[in-house]
């Protein structure tokens, strides 16, 4: 394929513009492996990149898309052969390196993960960075001592991609899950994924006390800000909180009380630069005991490349439940 289609973002006088163009390999960032992409997906970071929100994209023009799955069509690295099924998440893909919204994707071989048996390329992107982040949070929490007997796990941003997949993954692993959402009309959806309880965010009393009644055996928080401070104050003694996002703010105003009075631990989850050996282990688990049971319900909204800009605008407007996947 000498020419191929890709969605590119451009910095123009009136702002960031996204459009589908015809490119050649020389238009892409350098790399020693070329992938014939079959699927990508839309994460919150992708929506920011396509709509020009924030500073996700480091250079223009650029092909966004922080995730991609497909088959190798060319490799200059002896570890990988043509025809192998692979995926890439993170490593600056779709930020400073041309990403997954392209029929051909060129990357560094060190970034590749072989798609494990038990996952199709489509399923790998239904999971994508969102599911990988949720499973990485479980991995890190477990290694810090979290187990189902500790008490319920609170998942914030519950109707989003990470939140939806976290509910599915944690409930499958035997945890009782409480979903926190601002969308009262999505209670049935969240319970269908495995949530035992649904809390509405407008019912929270934030910032009232340095310590609240200890309720959570663990938490997976994608919001940050005041919500994360409240979670820390209401986590049980010697339990753990995984911080995975900042949708509600980057500032964390709290006290040391949860840490020195209750021994609560705050664990940061950095999925884009996760070490390769941990990536491989987590993806193996996602293909086996942690494989989400409701992938079609969460990530069954399949769109074409040309539909990505509108889908990104919907996501930024918080009109999306679950995840979009992109057929390439």
Image (spheres, grey):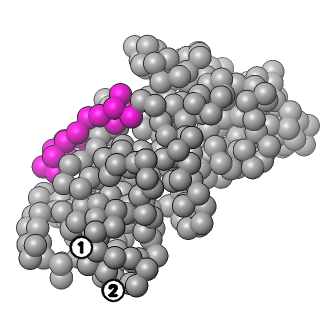
Question: Residue at the location (59% across, 17% down)?
Answer: 196
Q: Is residue 300 magenta?
A: yes
**What is the crowding at mark 2: few (fewer than 14 residues within 10 Å), some, or many (at least 20)?**
few
Whether residue 99 sits left or right of residue 230 in the image: it is left
Instruction: Please identify the quarter of the rendering in which residue 107 is found.
Output: bottom left
Q: Which mark, by number, is residue 76?
A: 2
Q: Residue at x 18, y 63 (%)?
A: 103
In the displayed structure, 112 sits above or below 136; it is below
Left or right side of 51 for 205? right
Asked if residue 266 can be seen in this view, the reply is no
Please, is residue 248 above or below residue 209 in the view? below
Label ID, residue 73:
1
What range of the chain is rendered magenta?
295-315
Q: Position of residue 249 (x, y in %)?
A: 54, 43
Q: How many marks?
A: 2
Instruction: Please tell me in which quadrant of the rendered image residue 126 appears.
Output: top left
Closest to the observer, 327 or 322 = 327
- What secondary structure is found at the residue carrying circle 2? loop
Give the main secondary structure of the magenta stretch. Answer: helix
């Amino acid at each position: 394929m000498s020419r191929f289609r890709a969605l590119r973002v451009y910095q123009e006088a009136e702002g960031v513009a996204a459009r589908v163009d015809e490119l050649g390999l020389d238009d892409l960032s350098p790399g020693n492996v070329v992938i014939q992409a079959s699927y990508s997906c839309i994460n919150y970071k992708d929506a920011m990149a396509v709509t020009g929100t924030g500073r996700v994209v480091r250079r223009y023009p650029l092909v966004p898309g922080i995730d991609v799955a497909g088959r190798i069509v060319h490799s200059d690295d002896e570890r990988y052969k043509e025809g192998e099924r692979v995926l890439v998440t993170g490593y600056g893909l779709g930020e400073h390196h041309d990403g997954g919204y392209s029929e051909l994707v060129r990357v560094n071989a060190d970034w590749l993960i072989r798609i494990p048996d038990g996952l199709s390329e489509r399923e790998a992107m239904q999971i994508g960075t969102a599911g990988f982040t949720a499973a990485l949070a479980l991995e890190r929490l477990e290694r810090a001592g979290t187990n189902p007997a500790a008490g319920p796990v609170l998942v914030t941003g519950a109707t989003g991609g990470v939140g939806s997949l976290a509910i599915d993954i944690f409930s499958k692993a035997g945890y009782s899950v409480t979903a926190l959402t601002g969308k009262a009309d999505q209670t049935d959806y969240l319970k269908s994924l495995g949530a035992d309880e649904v809390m509405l965010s407008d019912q929270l009393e934030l910032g009232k006390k340095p310590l609240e009644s200890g309720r959570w055996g663990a938490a997976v928080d994608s919001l940050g800000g005041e919500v994360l401070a409240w979670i820390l104050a209401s986590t049980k003694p010697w339990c753990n909180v995984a911080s995975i996002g900042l949708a509600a703010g980057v500032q964390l105003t709290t006290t040391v009380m949860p840490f020195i009075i209750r021994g609560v631990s705050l664990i940061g989850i950095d999925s884009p630069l996760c070490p390769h050996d941990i990536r491989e282990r987590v993806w193996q688990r996602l293909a086996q005991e942690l494989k989400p049971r409701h992938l079609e319900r969460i990530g069954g909204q399949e769109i074409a490349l040309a539909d990505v800009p509108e889908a990104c605008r919907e996501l930024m407007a918080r009109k999306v439940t679950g995840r979009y996947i992109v057929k390439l």
